[in-house]
Amino acid sequence: MQKNLSPSSTSVKLLLAVALLLLAALPLTVAGQGMMPDEVFVSIRLYDDINPEAMDAIRHHTEAGFLPHIRGSEGFIGYYWLPDGERLATINLFASAEAAAASNEAARDYVAAHLAPLLPNPPLLIEGTVRIGVVQALDAMAADASGPLHASLRLYEDFATDDLAAYVETVEEGFLPLMTGSDGFFGYYMLTNDAGQLAALSVFDSEASALASNEKARDFVAENLTQYLPNAPLILNGSVGIAALAEQRGGMNLIDNRRFISVRMYTGLDAARQDDIVAIVEDGFLPIMRGSDGFIGYFLLFADADMTAVSLFESPAQAAASNAAAADFVAENLASLLPEAPSVFEGPIGLRIYNALPASMDGGAPLYASLRRYAEYDLTHFDDANALAQQHLVPQLLALDGFFAQYTMHDNDSNVVAISVYTSEAAAAAANESAMAFSREHLMQWSPEPPTGFNASVRIASLARLNDGENLVSGMMAAG
């Protein structure tokens, strides 16, 4: 077992709590209510001392890069990703101990290649076998994945393991109906181990229901289980970032982490006036975007006489509002510099990955982007294309030096736009080449015409969670 924490620390107790939560998290892909298979083998990795600001970047990398690999492994049953402050716990569930062990090697290699700066310490590794689990309403979850799942974990010490059978019967007959009958119930899991610890996990589709499960557990233990559980539990509450079950949506993440984007493409501008446009946008329009509800990010790209503005928001209404705000601002402040109306694309983001790189930005690194537009795209296969991209293209994009961000969106009509952002101009150009080759090999059946693409300099890059949403590259690049 790899070790990076003191066994006596409070940190380890919390990590063990999360570990037991994850050991309990058995994904059963059955309609209605069902019990777990006879054996499920589990591999847990617990990371500590993580910058909480980097959690989103880690999750995006994991979902786009590592999850496609692990769900393609033989015997894959499920994968969960759970952050807890500065800690992160990941779990792999497999049908054999060998496959579970192999997932640890795959995770080690992936972290070394892509996430080493964001996960500074080697993980505490825990392996085991799940014993009890009940899952409900997976059909609805698969058909309409929405917000994150919320979990409440109760970790008890000094559990009387000699009476496990009697304890399980009491829980199944008395407490389990309380959980399955609660609003938004998704799953209940229970784990014991030889160290006299018991973990009980309740999973719901709302935070309120998850928190309420702790009160129900407290009352039920007081009335029925004090001989088994003499001590009050350590309780953890949180949201699950990735929940991937092998037989649901092809093992893709059931939790909808989508955001919405608007892309405005302008042509016919005077390339010599780029600095003027940047100054006006940065001083006047960027503050409007940053102050808007649901703001996530804004990029302004230039390629000769073309300019592309990208706005990212939490909801489609907010993304659409950014287009209206842009039209008003251009009419009032930029009409002479942007003489032609833009082509506008807005819709959900199908693929979103980014690196938290404040050190590079503070050090003055410029950004470069490659942009690809697919026309006449068969959007009924957009998710299929993203799954292929996650498996074949994304690892190539992440491996290029200076990766910063990747976005792929569709406009609910027949257009797809993909944007890759790097700190290296050569890497941005290589990203376009890799994407073009990927399109020829995998996407011709759904997008018969090759995409139109170009490489661009990024003159404004603003992310809400970096530098308060101010421009990360202001003044660092010459026009053109």
Image (spheres, helix red, strand yellow):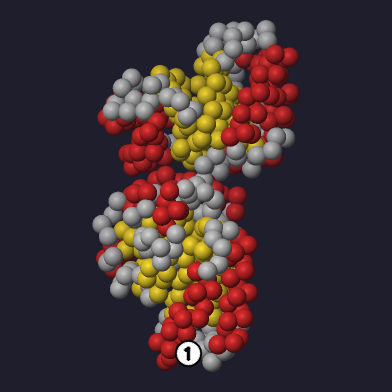
Residue at numbered disc 1? 160
Say which of 188 and 114 sits in front. 188
In what quadrant of the picture does the N terminus appear? bottom left
Q: Is residue 220 visible?
A: yes
Query: In this rendering, is residue 362 above or below 29?
Result: above
Say which of 393 and 313 sits in front. 313
Q: Residue at x 45, y 75 (%)?
A: 190
Query: In this rendering, is residue 98 above or below 337?
Result: below
**Which amino acid, mark 1?**
Ala
Q: Is residue 108 visible?
A: no
Residue 421 at x, y percent in the picture: 49, 31
Q: Residue 440: which quarter of the image? A: top left
Residue 276 at x, y percent in the picture: 68, 14
Query: In this rendering, is residue 371 above or below 257?
Result: above
Q: Residue at x 70, y 19 (%)?
A: 328
Residue 357 at x, y percent in the picture: 56, 41
Query: In this rendering, is residue 170 above or below 379?
Result: below
Q: Is residue 254 left or right of residue 358?
A: left
Say which of 36 and 306 sits in front. 36
Residue 154 at x, y percent in the picture: 55, 74
Q: Residue at x 52, y 24 (%)?
A: 345
Label 1 SS: loop
In what quadrant of the picture does the C terminus appear? top right
Tell me the crowding category of disc 1: few under 14, some 14 to 19, or many 20 or more residues within 10 angstroms, Cα based: some
